[in-house]
Image (cartoon, rainbow, N blue to C red):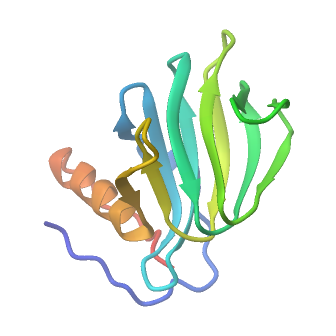
Amino acid sequence: MTTVDLTPMGDQLVDPVDLPWVPQAEGVWFKPLRLSPVSGTWTNLLKVTRRGVISRHRHPFPVEAWVLQGSWRYLEHDWTAGPGSYVYEPAGDVHTLVTEGEDEMVTLFSMHGRIDYLNDAGEVTFIETAQTKLDKYLDYCARHRLAPLPVVA
């Protein structure tokens, strides 16, 4: 496994073109722009190419999102976020992500803490953190013989 310097990166320009799309689930990928295992926060691009229910999850911490392409909504809300939309999700929000339409969805997410993925009974099935995102990124880079870029803050 590749080791990564956990020293804060300071001012840094990250060009998403230089980062790989890392598989997260079927039809779902992410590009890590900033990962901070120390603070538990991260910023990434999320791309979804499949239609339908993606995941039900809870945010114990706030989330901010800016839709760049395509659209998405939550079953629990009456709005749809499209290109240019900004979405704020308060701590404690539980919702089910759904993508529809013809275009793939790409959204910039800024996560202020972990995500708890839930099953239909509301039980936690997986906890995603800045560290689990970093681990996925490093594993992907190692498997594809890519040099990881400095995305740790």
Residue, far top: 102
Residue, far front: 121
Identify which residue, 140 or 24, lies in the foreground.
Answer: 24
Q: Residue at x 75, y 62 (%)?
A: 90
Specify whether residue 19 is in view.
no
Q: Residue at x 55, y 34 (%)?
A: 47
Q: Is residue 70 above or below residue 146?
A: above
Q: Is residue 62 left or right of residue 81?
A: left
- Residue 68, image x and y in percent? 74, 37
Identify which residue, 63 or 125, lies in the foreground.
Answer: 125
- Residue 148, image x and y in percent? 33, 62
Q: Quadrant of residue 132?
A: bottom left
Specify whether residue 139 is in view.
yes
Q: Residue at x 63, y 42 (%)?
A: 95
Q: Is residue 12 left or right of residue 18?
A: right
Q: Residue at x 18, y 68 (%)?
A: 2
- Residue 86, image x and y in percent? 84, 47
- Residue 99, image x and y in percent? 63, 23
Q: Is residue 120 left or right of residue 107?
A: left
Identify which residue, 107 or 98, lies in the foreground.
Answer: 98
